[in-house]
Amino acid sequence: MKSITIHNLDDRASEKLSEVAKAQGLSLNKTIKKILYESLGLKVGENKDHSEDFSEFFGNWSKEEGKIFEAAIQDFEKIDREDWN
């Protein structure tokens, strides 16, 4: 995500933004983002993580399968010092 800075914002706009933020019970940052999204015709939170939408293509394991795999590779977690001499 990107961050932006707004330079030379006049007092009227700054005060109005603060008023709107207070009236909506939001932070100034969230208020500005909301106004920006709305003015661009976007929904707030529209850019969410969609990875779960494609899980059928990922070859996911169940928790039980994950436990079996972890148990099977447990020996690989051990360091045999003699191998390094």
Image (cartoon, rainbow, N blue to C red):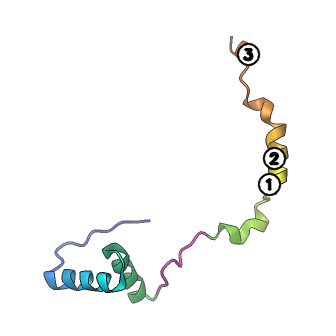
- Kind of residue at disc 2: Lys
Q: Does residue 11 lie above or below 57 as drawn?
A: below
Q: Does residue 17 lie above or below 76 as drawn?
A: below
Q: Residue at x 72, y 69 (%)?
A: 54
Q: Which residue is tagged 3?
A: 83
Q: Is residue 72 left or right of residue 28?
A: right
Q: Which residue is tagged 1?
A: 63
**Main SS of residues in magenta:** loop
Mark 2 touches mark 1? (CB < 8 Å): yes
Q: Quadrant of the C terminus?
A: top right
Q: Residue at x 25, y 80 (%)?
A: 18
Q: Earlier along the polypeptide chain: callout 3 or callout 2?
A: 2
- Kind of residue at disc 3: Asp
Q: Does residue 44 lie above or below 54 as drawn?
A: below
Q: Residue at x 48, y 80 (%)?
A: 44
Question: Gap between marks 2 and 1, in whole Å?
Answer: 6 Å
Question: Gap between marks 3 and 2, in whole Å?
Answer: 28 Å
Residue 27 falls in which quadrant of the image? bottom left
The magenta region covers 42-49
Q: Nearer the viewer, mark 3 or mark 2?
A: 2
Counting from the top left corner in percent of width and height, residue 35 is at 36, 84
